[in-house]
Amino acid sequence: MGTQPYRDAINKSGDIFQIIIAWIITFLFYTLSNVAILCCLASIIGGICNRAKDTPILILAANGLFIYLILISGLLLLGTSPFDNISQAQYTRLAGTSSLFSFMIGYNPKMLSRLIAKLEELTEGKPLNKE
């Protein structure tokens, strides 16, 4: 769903009710915020599917948000404007990939700690441990 008319409505002065509705629709359906919501939900669903852990829902959502930030920052490194005019196929790949990784992290939180350890090794210039 295109959000440009709603984003334009936010910038116009007018009825506060219409502006609030425009903010809500933009938040729910704008590509970047929509993918963030999907990541949080996928991580929560992954945690619910793994019944052996009693991880709080807010922690699961934060894990999904972390995966979202990693993927989005990676996309920003690869291109100058990767989010301009995103096609449905690009959105599907972005949403599917981020949701999959978020589900996996929610299902097995140890994967997140391993991922953070690998990122620390890369940023410190140390060779990766072969496990």
Image (spheres, helix red, strand yellow):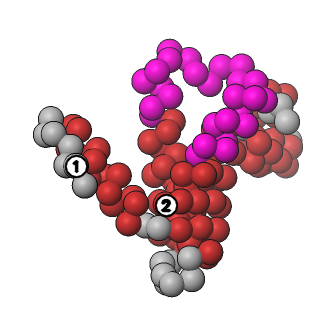
Out of 51 and 130, give the one closest to the viewer.
130
Q: State which quadrant residue 46 falls in.
A: bottom right
**Residue 68 x/y as whole percent:** 52, 46
Q: In the image, which is nearer the foreground, mark 1 or mark 2?
A: 1
Q: Position of residue 10 (x, y in %)?
A: 75, 34
Q: Secondary structure at mark 2?
A: helix
Image disc number at residue 21? none
Q: Is residue 62 left or right of residue 128?
A: right
Which residue is at a point 23% across and 38% down the rendered structure image?
122
Q: Nearer the viewer, residue 128 or 97?
A: 128
Q: Which residue is mark 1?
A: 130
Which of these two is toward me, 64 or 18? 64
**Mark 2 nearby-residue class (10 Å; few <14, some 14–19, many ≥20):** many
Left or right of residue 61: residue 41 = right
Say what secondary structure mark 1 lies in: loop
On residue 105, the disc is 2
Mark pair 1, 2: CA separation: 21 Å
Tell me where residue 25 appears, x and y as whole percent.
80, 45
Magenta span main SS: helix
Taking 92 as reference, is 65 above or below it?
A: below
* Residue 85 counted in the magenta span: yes
Q: Position of residue 15 (x, y in %)?
A: 86, 42
Regarding residue 124, the answer to whether it shows in the image is no
Q: Is residue 102 visible?
A: yes
Please state which amino acid type lies under the numbered disc 1.
Lys
Give the position of the N terminus as an image quadrant.
Answer: top right
Q: Residue at x 27, y 47 (%)?
A: 118
Vertical position of residue 107 compared to residue 37: above or below: below
Left/right of residue 30 with respect to residue 60 in the rendered view:
right
- Quadrant of the snapshot with the C terminus: bottom left
Q: Which residues are magenta?
A: 73-98
